[in-house]
Image: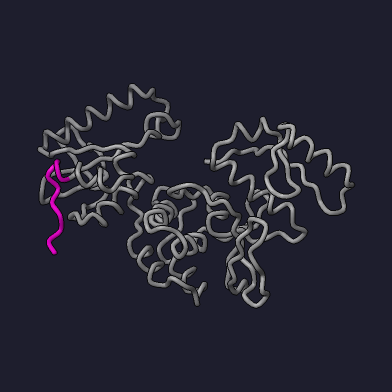
Amino acid sequence: MTQAIPPTITQVRELDLSDDRHRLAQAARAGVQHRIRRGAYVSTASWAGLHADARYRLRCLAESEAKRTRPILSHWSAAVVHGIPVIGDWPPHVHRLVERASGGRSRNAVVAHPTSLDSVETVEVDGMLVTSVARTIVDLAGAGSFISAVTSADYALQRRRKNRVRASDLRAAFDAAMPVRATARIERVLEFATELTDSPAESVSRVNMYVSGFVMPSLQSEFFDAQGFIGAVDFDWPQLNHVGEVDGRHKYIKDEYLNGRTPGEVVYEEKLREDRLRALPKKVTRWDWHCALDPQRLRAHLLRAGIPLRRR
């Protein structure tokens, strides 16, 4: 999600010579240097080669390095450092926690969130001080959209992830953060989140199924035939003999999903797997990331496939 080795940031601090500041400002006006924040620059060529996640992470790194006392990055800023996915664009500001009694304010593209710092679990990642994964999920649940917060929480809980957190960890972080605003919103995210999704596409699909009023499926149901194990499906409506699969692009292009196979081999294996499911017999409905993300499009797709709505 983020680059392992970020570009070198040139920081201009108050004690630096004014001609250095002037030289970098001239280079920025000439298009040679890109200004990340006040007093922090990176080469324009390096900036142009970064995707959105890496650019936002670099801004957080610049903010962290600019302070004599490292800030505690939080919310979306902690998420990008941890590699936690969010839905939508990264925010235009860096987010940090400040002591509730300190009177810290938001300024210079930095949003300050008052809290009791004694209750905050922090970790150091690549020289940055950030809230723990569990606290980050709680903060996102209170401040972000439901669909994005669930996607982030599902990722943190994923049972196959090496450094996964557990539902009890999220609850403990929630209790430690009290009192907080948006308590009901956080509760809703923590109740809905699950360890049984394996991708953001599955999380987004599940949220949009719920808000659209569909009968909710079982997750990661395993199927077998005379040949043995077929696989675990993303979504299963056993009462309908109907399974659903959402396909993200990563399955066909990222090394961790390919496992040494070519994209063509993955497509062929998926076809064989689907044929075996249909022979059980199961109806199989598939959709892609763009359909998952658009609730109206997903609703129409699932209704055409015969997935019923919940009775009121």
At 33% across and 23% down in the image, what residue appears?
265
**Residue 47, image x and y in percent?**
64, 35
Note whether 85 is above or below 72 in the view shown. above
The residue stretch that appears in magenta:
303-312
- Where residue 56 appears, as percent x and y from the top left, is 58, 46
Side of 264 relative to 282 (left or right): right
In the image, residue 192 above or below residue 273: below
Q: Position of residue 312 (x, y in %)?
A: 14, 64
| Dominant SS in magenta | loop
Camera-side residue of 162 and 205? 205
Q: Toward the viewer: 280 or 108? A: 108
Residue at the (65%, 78%) spot, across then down: 101
The x and y percentages for residue 162 are 47, 49
Residue visible at 78% across and 40% down? Answer: 25
Residue at 17% from the left image edge and 38% from the top image edge: 284
Q: Is residue 137 left or right of residue 219?
A: right
Which residue sits furthest front? 29
Q: Is residue 83 magenta?
A: no
Does 306 lie within the magenta span? yes
Q: In front here: 149 or 251?
A: 149
> In front here: 159 or 28?
28
In the rendered view, would you say 22 is above or below 265? below
